Image: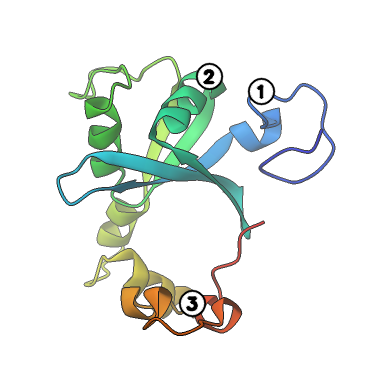
């Protein structure tokens, strides 16, 4: 089978992810306006990401035993996951058994002196990425050329 992270044929996949990809993963959750978990994305390589609904995301995170879990404003994501039922001590007294280390790109950006800590602003400034607005993605009822709108947003 092919690994969800690297796309290569790998032995010993766990929930579709190989051991190498499980060493460092990036998480981004999506919520309702009320902060209820809708689902989220896990990735370990540029250009490849896997979306999970809320239940699937909780199941995968519990099972993977991730080495380094990274995210932008990871504290928010972890609080959402805890409210949704992911077991761990949200006071950070100890890490749960499903992860060995945590890293937050928003905190890193603050530490090196960036003024605008929003992920889209940092991606545009540092990586030259462009993100469509909600209106551009939603469209106006007419046919929408996603390849033109999505630009740098490519997932396998």
Whether pointer 1 and pointer 3 mark residues with C-beta atoms closer than 8 Å, the reply is: no
**Viewport quadrant of the N terminus:** top right
* Pick the front one: 47 or 143: 143
Looking at the rendered structure, the secondary structure element under dot 2 is helix
Between the residue at mark 1 and the residue at mark 3, the CA separation in whole angstroms equals: 32 Å
Up the image or down, 23 lies above or below 129; here it is above
* Pick the front one: 144 or 154: 144
**Viewport quadrant of the C terminus:** bottom right
Q: Residue at x 51, y 27 (%)?
A: 60
Q: Residue at x 36, y 83 (%)?
A: 140
Give the labeled residue for mark 2: 63
Up the image or down, 3 lies above or below 28; here it is above
Give the labeled residue for mark 3: 129
**Label number found at residue 14:** 1
Q: Pointer 3: residues within 10 angstroms few (<14), some, or many (20+)?
A: some
Counting from the top left corner in percent of width and height, residue 137 is at: 42, 74
Up the image or down, 8 lies above or below 155; here it is above
Between the residue at mark 2 and the residue at mark 1, the CA separation in whole angstroms equals: 8 Å
Q: Residue at x 85, y 37 (%)?
A: 9
Between the residue at mark 3 and the residue at mark 2, the CA separation in whole angstroms equals: 32 Å
Counting residues from the start of the chain, the first of labels 2 and 1 encountered is 1
Counting from the top left corner in percent of width and height, residue 14 is at: 66, 23
* Pick the front one: 32 or 24: 32
Counting residues from the start of the chain, the first of labels 3 and 2 encountered is 2
Counting from the top left corner in percent of width and height, residue 127 is at: 49, 75
Whether pointer 2 and pointer 1 mark residues with C-beta atoms closer than 8 Å, the reply is: yes
Q: Please, which residue is most extreme toward the front here?
A: 141
Instruction: Give the quarter of the image for residue 53.
Output: top left
Looking at the rendered structure, the secondary structure element under dot 1 is loop
Counting residues from the start of the chain, the first of labels 1 and 3 encountered is 1
Counting from the top left corner in percent of width and height, residue 11 is at: 82, 25
């Amino acid at each position: 089978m092919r690994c969800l992270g690297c796309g290569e044929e790998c032995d010993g996949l766990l929930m579709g992810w190989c051991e190498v990809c499980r060493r460092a993963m990036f998480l981004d959750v999506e919520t309702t306006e009320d902060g209820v978990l809708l689902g989220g994305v896990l990735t370990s390589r540029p250009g490849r990401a896997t979306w999970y609904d809320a239940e699937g995301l909780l199941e995968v995170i519990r099972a993977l035993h991730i080495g380094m879990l990274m995210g932008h404003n990871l504290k928010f994501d972890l609080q959402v996951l805890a409210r949704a039922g992911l077991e761990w001590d949200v006071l950070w007294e100890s890490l749960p058994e499903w992860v060995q280390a945590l890293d937050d790109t928003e905190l890193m950006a603050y530490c090196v002196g960036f003024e605008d800590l929003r992920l889209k602003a940092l991606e545009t400034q540092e990586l030259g990425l462009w993100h469509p607005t909600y209106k551009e993605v939603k469209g106006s009822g007419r046919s929408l050329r996603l390849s033109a709108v999505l630009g740098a947003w490519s997932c396998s």
